[in-house]
Amino acid sequence: MKRSILFGLSVLISLLLGSSVMAATERRVALVIGNNDYQSIVKLEKAVNDANAVAAELRKVGFEVEVLNNVGRKKMNLAINDFVQKVSGGGVGVFFFAGHGLQINNQNYLVPIDMDTPNDPADVVDQAVSVPILQDKLADAKAKYTLLVLDACRNNPLPKKAGRSIGTTRGLAMTNSPNGQTVLYSAGANQEALDSLGNNDKNPNGLFTREFLPTISQPGISSTEALKKTRSMVIQKAKSVGHEQQPAIYDQADGDFYFVSGPAPAQRSTAAGAAGSTTTIVQAVDPQAIELSFWDTIKDSKQSADYQDYLAKYPNGQFAPLASRRVAALSQTVSRSSDAVPASASAPSAPSAVAAEPTQVAMGSAPPPAAAAPSASSGPSMASKIEEQGKMNNLKVTDMRATKRDNLLRIQVDVTNISSSNQQLYYRFKWLDRDGFTVWDEEPWKPMIVYGNQKQVINVVSPTFKATDFRLILQSPDNSGN
């Protein structure tokens, strides 16, 4: 609720103060591609319909749209280069692709209609369009923000050779998005996106697109919120036919992206009318995210001035009470250290704590000898706190500690790479109350590189005091299927 209010205020301020300036200076461009008529591999039925429907919605909300149907590799690459040029130097772009997609060695490729049936994975690399190269082009162009929507997680259309599929069995691999980019997938890692819910499904669009379309023209709905709405409906409808499909977002943007600025429908007022009918895209910065980033840089500091700086900037911030106590405690520590206390006056005392003594639980490993924490056997196991989406082959959670201090959970997780090669990890936390109900919005995936035969540490603080429990959700490109 707090997050929604912050977003709403941010968007309203943008409307009243800056929408006309942004509309005049910010170019909004979309490239939409739909491929059905594949010449050498399995044809599709609804990809062109999906692309045309998305193009129409984007035009309604003020995009300059180029839409291509049933195109080969050369034309796709020319259109991509033109798209990159148009958004260069601070433009905002949306790239939508509906068609076949493949992953080769954890790299994603979009399949043009003229790709010949490959005899080797290298043939796919030579003939298909690389998603990482597309992302690199957009990053080099210094686009302000780009959203890539890939409705390309359909079943692997390629034949088997020597008993093995060329490419993975199904779905696309996870991506490591450059800064300023968000990638939306119609299905999660190694999942297949449905074109239809059955033989009697007469909807002209695939499952993801039909649920995604209505969110484009809703004012005040960010891409993250749009995906959450879409995701919920897709999961529900896919399960109704015994299928698992969970749309996923990989977000490296500094703020939220809006197709149409303005208050959400339930919050509209006469102020919206005063701002005019011009539609614009606002990449609003989440004030709470900025505050959390600031706090993360000082939370372990032993300098009182750092906490005073935080209080000066955020006098009513989420961590203001804690910062005030840190300032007071550090001041007392300095005062005590300046007093001359005879060594014989008392027995040596334990170091003074900055805040109230936390309750710490070590999960799956014994606490340090000097710690007063409960033993591992009295606390929950690590396995009960971890949800792996697929089996982790090379990455292992080797230690986990949960501390509650100032009514906030503080989690430390050690992730060890047991292989000699670097491994990509994606993680997010689910925050729960004592009854197991979710108390915070679903987090976007966060990327991490774990170097060969080394350990990386995840440190996180719960976003709300209502969180008394958690789950750590993990994905890695080297995960094997369940």
Image: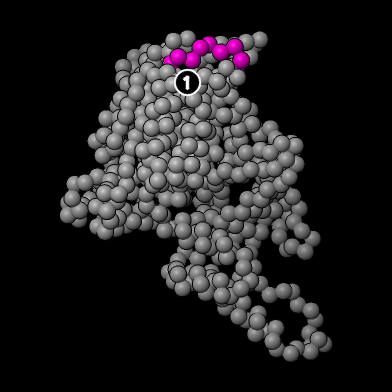
Could you say where residue 430 lies in the image, as x and y percent from the top left? 52, 46
List x then y, in percent, for residue 202.
Answer: 31, 17
Q: In which quarter of the image is residue 45?
A: top left
Q: Which amino acid does label 1 sit on?
A: Val
Residue identified by numbered label 1: 111
Quarter of the figure with residue 307? bottom right
Element on which disc 1 rests = loop
Q: For this view, does 91 lie left or right of residue 416?
A: left
| Magenta span contains residue 344 | no
Q: Which of 98 and 308 is in front in this view?
A: 98
Q: How crowded is mark 1: few (under 14 residues within 10 Å), some or many (20 or more)?
A: many
Please, is residue 148 above or below residue 326 in the view? above
Is 118 covered by the magenta stretch? Answer: yes
Q: Which of 423 and 418 is in front in this view?
A: 423
Q: What stretch is highlighted in magenta?
A: 113-121
Q: In which quarter of the image is residue 241?
A: top left
In the rendered image, the quadrant that contains the C terminus is top right
